[in-house]
Image (cartoon, rainbow, N blue to C red):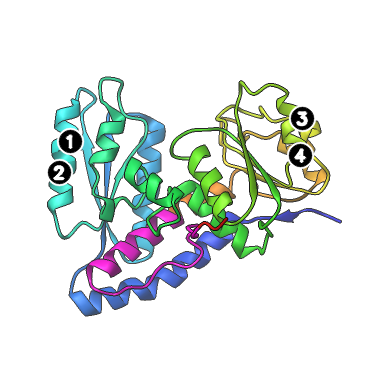
Amino acid sequence: MSALVLDGKAYARQMESELLPRVEALRAKTGETPILATILVGADPASATYVRMKGNACRRVGMDSLAVHLPEETTTEDLLAKIDELNADPRVHGILLQHPVPGQIDERACFDRIALTKDVDGVTALGFGLMAMGEHVYGSATPGGIMRLLRHYNIPMEGREAVVVGRSPILGKPMAMMLLGANATVTICHSRTKNLAEVVSRAEILVGAVGKPEFIKADWIREGAVIVDAGYHPGGVGDVELSRAIDRCSAYTPVPGGVGPMTIATLIAQTVEAAQKAAGIQRPVPNSGINRIHP
C-alpha cells in the first residue's frame, strides 16, 4: 500500500479559499483591510523571497501587506523602534520579523518586543509560555501549520509516540509542546543526542526539524511511521532521507510542497484571526494546534 501524501500545498490553497470570505466580511464590517507587516533587515536573497511569498499570500486572500525593509547596518535600537511603531499602528494586525537578522541585532529582544496580540508568527517568549500552558495564543507558524495538516488528514496523535528531531525556539520546542497538547507522548532530540537512530526508530510520528540536509536516515525510521519533514535545503531535499523512506512510512510531507505552504497559510490565518479579534469578532481559527493540557 502506497504512503499517504500530506499535501500542504493543496490544503494551503483550501485554507486561502476559506479565508477570503472572512476578509471580505471584515472589510464590510470595519471598512478596513487586515494588514500583515513584514520586517526584513538586510538583503539576504532567501529571506527576501520568503517575505515576498508571504506578501503574495496576503493579496490572494484580500489582505494587505506592509513591507518594511531596513538596511543591513540596522541596530537593535533601530529595529525595536520600528516594532514599537507597528505595535502602535491600529491598522496593523500582525507583525512578522523575518529570521535571521544580522548578527549585531539582539534577535530575541526584538522578537519579544512584538505585541502579543500581533505576534501572529508565534515568536515571543510570552506566547511560547502561554502555548505550553495550554492557553489560546498564536502558536509558532510552522509547527502550527504541521498540526493543521495532521488534523486535516486525520492522522491520530493521541497516545502515539512522537519524536521531534530539533530544538529551536520557533520550531522544535513549540512543535513538541503542540504534540504534547494533542496527547502524544513526545521525545525531543537533536544532533548531539546519543543513540539518535535508536530514538528515531521508536517514532510513530517523526518530525524532522534539525536544519541539516538528509540528516535523518531512512533506515532509522520504523515501518508505518508518519514522517513530517520541516526542512528545506538546496537541491530540494529536507532533513529526512525521504526518497528512501517513502516505501516504509504510512504518510509523509513532500519536500517541497508539504510544510512550507502550511507555514505561510497559518501565518495568514492567524493574522485574519487577530483582525477579527480587533474588530470584536471572537472566532478562533480551527485546528490551531493549541489545546489545553490535561494530566
Sequence-first disc among 2 and 4: 2
Which residue is tagged 2? 84
Q: Which mark is residue 294?
A: none
Q: Residue visible at 55% across and 30% down?
A: 211
Amino acid on which disc 2 is placed = Asp
> Which x, y percent locates residue 272?
33, 64
Of badges 2 and 4, nearer the viewer stands 4
Q: CA distance from mark 3 to mark 2?
A: 47 Å
Mark 1 — residue?
A: 80
The kind of residue on which mark 1 rests is Leu
Mark 1 vs mark 2, CA separation in Å? 6 Å
**Structural distance between the alpha carbons of marks 2 and 4:** 46 Å
Magenta region: which residues?
265-292
Q: Is there CB contact under 8 Å for labels 1 and 2?
A: yes
Element class at badge 3:
helix
How busy is the neighbourhood of tag 1: few (under 14 within 10 Å), some, or many (20 plus)?
A: many
Which kind of residue does numbered mark 3 sit on? Answer: Glu
Left or right for 166, reference 247: left
Which residue is under mark 4? 202
Residue 293 in the magenta stretch? The answer is no
Label 4 near label 3: C-beta < 8 Å? yes
**Disc with the residue nearer the chain's start (3 vs 1):** 1
Depth check, mark 3 against mark 2: the one in front is: 3
Q: Amino acid at mark 4?
A: Arg
Horizontal side of residue 66 vs 1, given as left or right: left
Label 4 sits on a secondary structure element that is loop
Q: Earlier in the sequence, mark 3 or mark 2?
A: 2
